[in-house]
Image (cartoon, rainbow, N blue to C red):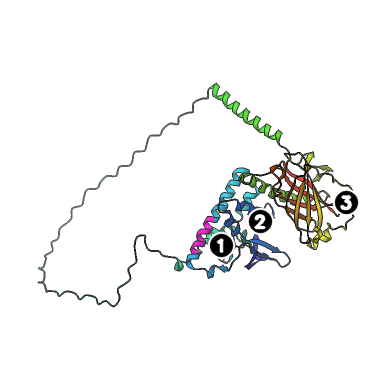
Amino acid sequence: MQKLPIITKTSEIDIKSVYGQSIFDFYPQLKKILIQQTNGNELSQFFSEPVVNNVRGEVTWFSTVSGSVRGIPEMTAEERQRVGEQIKSFSQMVKDAANHLEAMSGPKALGVEALRNLLVTPNLANSLFLVGDKLVIAQWGCVPHGIDPKDFDIVTQGKNLIPPEQAIIAPLPGTTPVPPPEDETPPSPPPTTPSPPPEPVVATTSTPTPAPATPVVPPIPPEPVPPVPPLPLTPTEILWRWLVILLLCLLLLFGLLTKSCTYGVLAPSDNESRLRTDISELWVKVQQKAASCFPNDSGLHHDDGKNTHPQSESNNVPQSESQNLPNLPPVLNEESLKKNDLKVFEGKWKLVTPLVNRYTEEPITILFDFDKSGKGNQMVNHKSGKTCTGTASASIVSGTSFKIDMGACSGAGKQYSYPAELAPCELMKNPNQAQCILACADGPCNATFERY
């Protein structure tokens, strides 16, 4: 990661929000969506990563691109012109991704709102950098404090990026500029012969005859065409329409009845399914944020002692496979998490889930082994002896919550492989346990994170 030469004061900006949550919190999910677009690598690298320091009230910006860093004043006129064209291209790609999500999930989907809030910045000239030969933008998703954000669109600001005196004027196609002649004496003018003076012309005055005025004829309005009434439907057409509607209802009912909570494999080439996974992750984060507002151990919304969480009974928190946890020091508590020290995750953990493998119908328990920095690996064992493995990492969100980021778990064949998963977790009374939320087929479901 390379630090960009810019620091943003949080007191001077307003950070765009998505349903009450900062757009910076959705940066990993947005990057996954952008990288799936055409020319996705450059598009995802265009938006730098924000790191917020609430103590200092600052936002620092980092880029995954390596190389020398140059701002707008250090760019040539040709580079500025190329930067202006890239801004238009990247903005259109982001808008196309937002329109695609809107067509699938509706205009109020979290991914649609988050993508459209990307395309603003308080000062484009101070936010653009060339890192090596790649264009990177900082201060995205921000506008000056207390000012109307409509004037800070990056495309609108990009039109004024190239001053007129620095614009490149190219010769017309098929022409070659001719340099002026050097050390060449201009030809002398030919000698002139004096001519006789012209004869005087006697002017005569006459009264011009005005031309007759042409009468103005108003245009004839076209005759209105009466509307043609639609032909009435025949009984046969009405019957066929009702049969089609009934067939669609039966197909929808069949799909609802056959849905089950499984942890299946997403094909890497299936862009639509992968986008749905990203949308689900965004929804889970907002759901976890809302659940943390209620003071109960499970983090679920209770009303008069009754559970009103919109999940079926199959999604309740699963019981631990081992009732007697190891005799280990209590580390998962508010005091430990507030220190922001990832050593609390060092050791072996497991995530007991309500998920089952759709091919083998085995319950899925994910095993973790983290080091002092919260990095490690994950593993799922099966009765057949097959194993899937992958990477995993733990990060602290607040004094009462953290998250487990799991990469794709690869095994022998698709029946022993699983996609990437993000698990937001909340503390429980037991200092070696936490409740996490997973993205299941029917929506969010609960799982238990504990030592083993």
- Label 2 vs label 3: CA separation? 36 Å
Query: Where does residue 12 sit, x and y in percent of width and height?
Result: 65, 65
Q: In the structure shown, which secondary structural element does the residue marked by tag 1 occupy?
A: strand
Local secondary structure at mark 3: loop
Give the quarter of the figure containing the N terminus.
Answer: bottom right
Nearer to me, 82 or 2: 2
In the image, taking residue 414 as reference, residue 383 lies left or right, namely right
Kind of residue at badge 2? Tyr
Q: Is residue 112 left or right of residue 177?
A: right
Is residue 396 visible in the rendered image? The answer is: no
| Overall secondary structure of the magenta section | helix
**CA distance separating discs 1 and 2:** 19 Å
Residue type at numbered disc 1: Lys
Judged from this view, the residue extending furthest toward the top is: 235
Q: Secondary structure at mark 2?
A: helix
The residue carrying mark 1 is 134
Tag 3: Cα neighbours inside 10 Å, few (<14), some, or many (≥20)? some
User: Where residue 69 sits: x, y (%)?
Assistant: 58, 68
Mark identifier at residue 318: none
Depth check, front residue: 251 or 301: 251
* Magenta segment: 80-89
417 sits to left or right of 295: left
